[in-house]
Amino acid sequence: MTSIHSDQPITQLAKLCNLEYELPKDLSISRLPGENLNFQINTGDGKWLALKLVGSEITSALIQLEHLIVDHLLTQGIEVSFPQIIPTKHGDIYTVFNTPDNIQYQVRLLEFLEGT
């Protein structure tokens, strides 16, 4: 399995962010602590984002359900902050990232909320 810690996948993730989310090319990406594949992105203009990668153990239906739940909670006026999904330039809630050895991840970009 390709290590997400190595520079090559990080560089590929930066390209993916530029192509799919139209983020600046000079962004910086760093791995967040924990067992999940989560990354913090600094766009260079003061904006911080979270990039979440999940493998085949999480279905696209589950990602859609999570998105619908958060959207519903946001419309209910609950006084709790939820990181909102930032759609791709095509309006999708996730895109796909393939490592050089063909391991596929579903990728979501979210607002970064400290402590979430």
Image (cartoon, grey):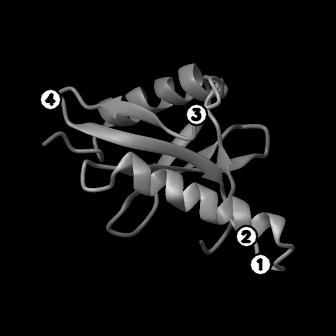
The residue drawn where x is 25% and y is 48% is 56
Q: CA distance from mark 2 to mark 3?
A: 20 Å
CB-based contact (under 8 Å), mark 4 and mark 2: no
CB-based contact (under 8 Å), mark 4 and mark 3: no
Q: Nearer the viewer, mark 1 or mark 3?
A: 3
Decide which of 111, 6 is in the foreground and name it: 111
Secondary structure of the residue carrying tag 2 is: helix
Q: Position of residue 44 (x, y in %)?
A: 71, 37
Q: What residue is disc 2 on?
A: 73
Image quadrant for the C terminus? bottom right
Secondary structure of the residue carrying tag 3 is: loop
Work out whether mark 4 precedes mark 1 in sequence or the reverse, and give the earlier one: 1
Q: What residue is disc 1 on?
A: 80
Judge the density around disc 4: few (<14), some (14-19), many (≥20) Cα neighbours within 10 Å.
few
Amino acid under disc 2: Leu
The residue drawn where x is 65% and y is 28% is 23
Q: Position of residue 52 (x, y in %)?
A: 47, 51
Q: What residue is disc 3 on?
A: 92
Decide which of 19, 9 is in the foreground and name it: 19
Work out whether mark 4 precedes mark 3 in sequence or the reverse, and give the earlier one: 3
Decide which of 115, 71 is in the foreground and name it: 71
